[in-house]
Amino acid sequence: MDLTTEYKPAIEAAALDRTESAVCESDLKGSTAADMQHMERMGKQQQLQRNFRQITSFSFSMILVATWETVFGVAGLGLTNGGSAGFIYMYIVVWIAFLCVYTSMAEMGSMAPTSGGQYHWVSEFAPPKYQKVLSYIVGWLSVLGWQTSVAAVSYLVATEIQGLIVLNQPSYTFERWHGTLLMIAVASLAALFNILLSKHLPTIEGLILILHLAGFLAILVPLWTLNPAATPTTVFTTFRNNGWDSTGTSCLVGILAPILTMLGADSVAHMSEEIRDASRALPRAIVYSCAFNGLLGLIMAITLCFVIGDVDTVLATPTGFVFIQLFYNTTGSLLATNAMCAVVIIVAFFAVITIMASASRQCFAFARDDGLPGSKWLRGVKEGWDLPLNAIYLSLGVAVLLSLIVVGSAAAFNSLTSLGAVALLSSYIFCVGCFLWNRLTGKVRLPSEFDLGRWSPVVSAVAVAGLLVMFVFAFFPPAPKPMLQAVNMNWSCLIFGSACAWGAGYYVLVARK
């Protein structure tokens, strides 16, 4: 894996031509002259078709993160550790931190728009002595994070479907193996979509964005109009300790809930080789999606805390999801509840499709630099399809294999979910940290369409500080004294260490050669 020549930063910045006449011929797959200049500087060949534009790139990132829908899926964790006040305040803190993170990544993405994303940026901005090893570490962490995310969100969709079945058929027994089969079905449909309908993905993402926004209003209005609302004092001052030594610790343990609602806005960076005029469209898609999704999520989180009623009763729902029980309590109608839940589940399913697209492109890019076992096979792009088909097959295969863990232990699978979050957070820490180092040491700056100027180091410093706090508490178990009950243990620290050790071994024995 030789990164030293391909990723050497340009010393001089050529002007990038973005006039209409700069659009390249069809054999360059819809690239502009600016796109081709960036690819040439990075030593990459244009293999994928550039089907995405500014608005569809924004739609892609919005749907993948799906913040307000994810708020419903993780509300139980946030309300258990921190209560309504802790959930809201931690959400705001995490949102601000991620705005800084994604703004820094947007700046990097404008300078080097490549599907490799974080690992490539590290190779551009890290100290020269450590570029190669740090780039490999971040590439491995990104693969780990994105591949497990496909499985995690597929599992979320599967269990939400199961929860809806429980509501409609109280006699139904919530079996783990049912969840496994549903999870495999969700992942398989996502893979088929990515293979057979990939050319239509930008258009469909735009349509799902409409559902994402219209569904927000369709759910928000009945929650406020049909439910008695708690007082602001109750919502904003009620904390839940959950047995921890302090309320502050409990809130920080619950920080994983808002983290999961905003993780992954970098996804569109991994599609950058399929975005026309990527250096301009990419950074705006990243920042706008985080800002807008974060606002929608905050409104929904506050709404949830105002109308949820008795928290303990709702948390004890047999459906397994707070939002399903809340929708039923609100409407008193199975039909209305099913319709409201369908919006959440449909958007979540399309999030799986976009996650698989991002995961496969990131895997393809890393394999292109010989960073993975079987790289020659994984980087293959079938002529005429303009898709990394083998990388898509891998993403599906990983999801299917991980789904089998659910049969044995849902707790073990939940630890894998935390592992995905931790791996992505780690990759963010490395790339933003290297970018901060680059700015503070006054190294050569690449041309950018999204330059923060003197504010760049400040934004990056806040981002790194926030990421470090999130990284630490993502390893915490959901309840104190977890060793008394194995189901409460967060095994992601052990799995993360093992995965890193395996990656380090592969690097020493194979990749660095």
Image (cartoon, rainbow, N blue to C red):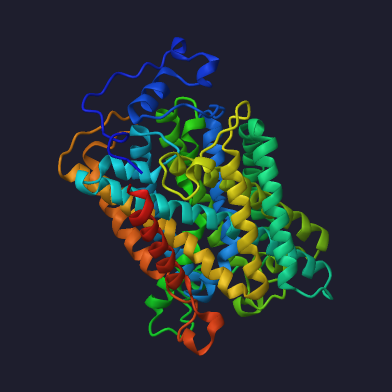
Position in image of residue 281 (x %, y %): 45, 30
Locate the N terminus and report the quarter of the image it occupies: top left
Please state which of residues 317 and 149 is positioned toward the viewer in this rendering.
Answer: 149
Relative vertical location of residue 44 with respect to residue 126 in this rendering, above or below: above
**Res 333 quadrant in image:** bottom right
Q: How many marks?
A: 0
Front residue (pair 304, 511): 511
Residue at 22% in and 24% down? 12
- Of residue 494 and residue 330, the one placed in the foreground of this image is 494
Q: Is residue 170 above or below residue 192?
A: below
Q: Is residue 276 visible?
A: yes
In the image, taking residue 386 as reference, residue 363 lies left or right, namely: left
- Residue found 32% across the figure and 49% down from its top: 512
In this view, the residue farthest toward the left is 441
State the residue at coordinates (47%, 52%): 143
Can see residue 351?
Answer: no
Residue furthest top as drawn: 21
Left or right relative to 224: residue 123:
left
Q: Which residue is painted at 42% across and 43% down in the image?
A: 370
In depth, the one of 316 and 195 nearer the eye is: 195
- The x, y position of residue 411, in whole percent, is 58, 75
Q: Seen in the image, is 342 located left or right of residue 358?
A: right
Q: Position of residue 188 (x, y in %)?
A: 70, 50
Percent coordinates x, y for residue 345 in the rendering: 69, 54
